[in-house]
């Protein structure tokens, strides 16, 4: 997949995550993309793209990778 398409997918996932957080009380979320077509975990704009076969391992190591991952939370109002 070319980088332009990948960047577009990442931006859309970030927007979906922002919409979820805006509608959910006290939510903090991290956009993550799970794919069938990739060999290893990569990060694009701090959004992890995780092959489905590595999802369990990614979740086990989630807190260790948290500083690399974009998180979104509702702004205080």
Image (cartoon, rainbow, N blue to C red):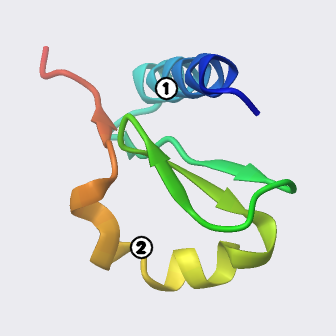
| Along the line of sight, the residue nearer the viewer: 69 or 24 | 69
Q: Position of residue 23 (x, y in %)?
A: 49, 21
- Establish if 63 lies above or below 30: below
11 horizontally vs 68: left or right:
right
5 horizontally vs 13: left or right:
right
Look at the image and tell me in which quarter the C terminus lies: top left
- Establish if 74 lies above or below 51: above
Residue annotated with mark 2: 62
69 horizontally vs 77: left or right:
right
Please tell me which residue is depicted at 64% across the width and 60% down the height of the picture. Answer: 50
Element type where label 2 sits in the image: loop
Q: Position of residue 41 (x, y in %)?
A: 57, 63
Q: Along the polypeptide, which appears first: circle 2 or circle 1?
A: 1
Look at the image and tell me in which quarter the N terminus lies: top right
Quarter location, residue 39: bottom right
Q: Alpha-carbon neighbours of circle 1 within 10 Å: few (<14), some, or many (≥20)?
A: many
Q: Alpha-carbon neighbours of circle 2 within 10 Å: few (<14), some, or many (≥20)?
A: few
The residues tagged by marks 2 and 1 sit, at their Cα atoms, a distance apart of: 18 Å
| Along the line of sight, the residue nearer the viewer: 15 or 43 | 43
């Amino acid at each position: 997949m070319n980088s332009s398409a990948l960047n577009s997918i990442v931006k859309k996932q970030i927007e979906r995550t922002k919409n979820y957080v805006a509608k959910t009380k006290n939510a903090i979320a991290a956009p993550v993309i799970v794919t069938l077509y990739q060999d290893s975990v990569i990060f694009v704009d701090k959004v992890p793209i995780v092959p489905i076969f590595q999802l369990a391992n990614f979740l086990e190591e989630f807190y260790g990778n948290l500083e690399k991952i974009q998180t979104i939370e509702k702004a205080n109002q």
